[in-house]
Image: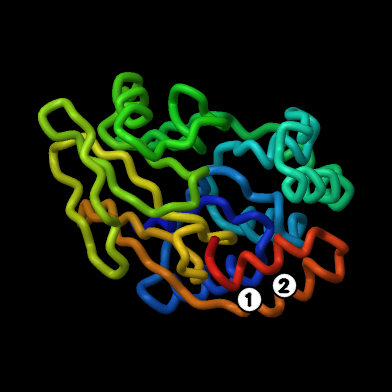
Amino acid sequence: MRILVCTDVHANLEALQAVFSDADARGGFEEVWVLGDLVGYGPDPEACVRLLREFPLSAVAGNHDHAAVGKLDPVTFNHAAEAAARWTSGQLSDDTTLFLSSLPLVVFRGAFTLVHGSLRAPIHEYLLNEESARGTLRLMRSQFCMVGHSHYPFLCQEEEGSPAFVEFQEGRSYPLDGRRWIINPGGLGQPRDRDPRANYAIYDDAEGTVEHRRVTYDIAATQAKIRKAGLPEYLAARLSDGV
C-alpha cells in the first residue's frame, strides 16, 4: 500500500490539489495521513477538508484546527494567525466543524504514531532540536513517529539512544531500517524552509520506504483568494518566499 503523508495544509486548495495530482501521476496512493492543521491561514478551509475526506483518511488535530472550532483561544496566536483563525471559524459548515472537533491528538497506524507537534505537547511543541526529539523518543511506543507543525521537512533517526537530524532530501527514497525514526514531510500549504513548493511524502509499506516530494502550484491564485477574503497581506506575501 502507498500512503500519501502530509501536514499543515492550512486551507491552501491549490497546493492540495497539486499534491494529489502529482502523487496520482507518480504511482498513485491508497490512503492519506494528515498530521494536523488542515485549516488556518489559507482561504479555502471548507473545500480542503471536503477534498481530504474524499479519500481513506487518518488525521490528527493541529493547533489551528482547534482554534477554528473553539477548542483553543486564538488570542495566543500572532496577529495574522489570530485574524485567520477567527475568519476560518465563520467559513466552516456544521459538518466540517464537527469533523475537526472530533480529530484525535494522536493516531496509531501499525508501526507509526501520528501527531501534529510532539508526543509531549501534541498541538503545541515544535520538534526541531535534540531536546524536543528526545522528549518524543522517550514517549514513543511505536518504531516510527510522524510529525508536522514546524513546516520543515526532516528526518530524525535514533543513533545509540540519541536523536540525529538528517536532511529529508527531495526525490530520495529512504529505507526504514530497524532504528526508530521521527519523520516530518514539511508544510504542504505553507512551507517555511524558503522553498515555496508544496511538500508531501509517500510511505510505501510493501517496500518499507518513505520518499519526500515537492510540487509547484498556482501560488498567485491562492494569494488572490487570501486578499479577496480580506485576510492579512502577510499571509499572501509569505507564500511566494516559502517562509
Nearer to the camera, 193 or 93 = 193
Q: Residues within 10 Å of mark 2 (few under 14, many from 20)?
A: many
Which quarter of the image is occupied by the C terminus? bottom right
What mark, if any, has residue 223 been given in the picture?
A: 2
Q: Circle 1 sits on which residue?
A: 219
Which quarter of the image is occupied by the N terminus? bottom left
Circles 2 and 1, Cβ within 8 Å, touching? The answer is yes
- Based on the displayed image, in which of its 4 quarters is residue 206 positioned? bottom left
Which residue is at a point 84% across and 44% down the rendered structure image?
Answer: 86
What mark, if any, has residue 3 been given in the picture?
A: none
Residue 215 drawn at (x, y percent): 46, 74
- Based on the displayed image, in which of its 4 quarters is residue 221 positioned? bottom right
Nearer to the camera, 230 or 26 = 230
- In the picture, measured across the screen, residue 50 lies left or right of residue 158, that is right
- In the picture, measured across the screen, residue 113 lies left or right of residue 211, that is right
Query: Can the viewer see residue 46 in this picture?
Result: yes
Rendered view: 45 above or below 74: below
Q: Amino acid at mark 2?
A: Gln
Nearer to the camera, 39 or 21 = 39
Mark 2–mark 1 distance (CA, rounded to whole Å): 6 Å
Which residue is at a point 40% across and 55% down the rendered structure image?
Answer: 3
Q: Amino acid at mark 1?
A: Ile
Q: Secondary structure at mark 1?
A: helix
Give the residue at the far left of this rendering.
160
- Based on the displayed image, in which of its 4 quarters is residue 142 positioned? top left
Q: Secondary structure at mark 2?
A: helix
Residue 62 drawn at (x, y percent): 60, 38
Residue 27 drawn at (x, y percent): 36, 73
Which residue is at a point 30% across and 20% down the rendered structure image?
Answer: 138
Q: Residues within 10 Å of mark 1 (few under 14, many from 20)?
A: some
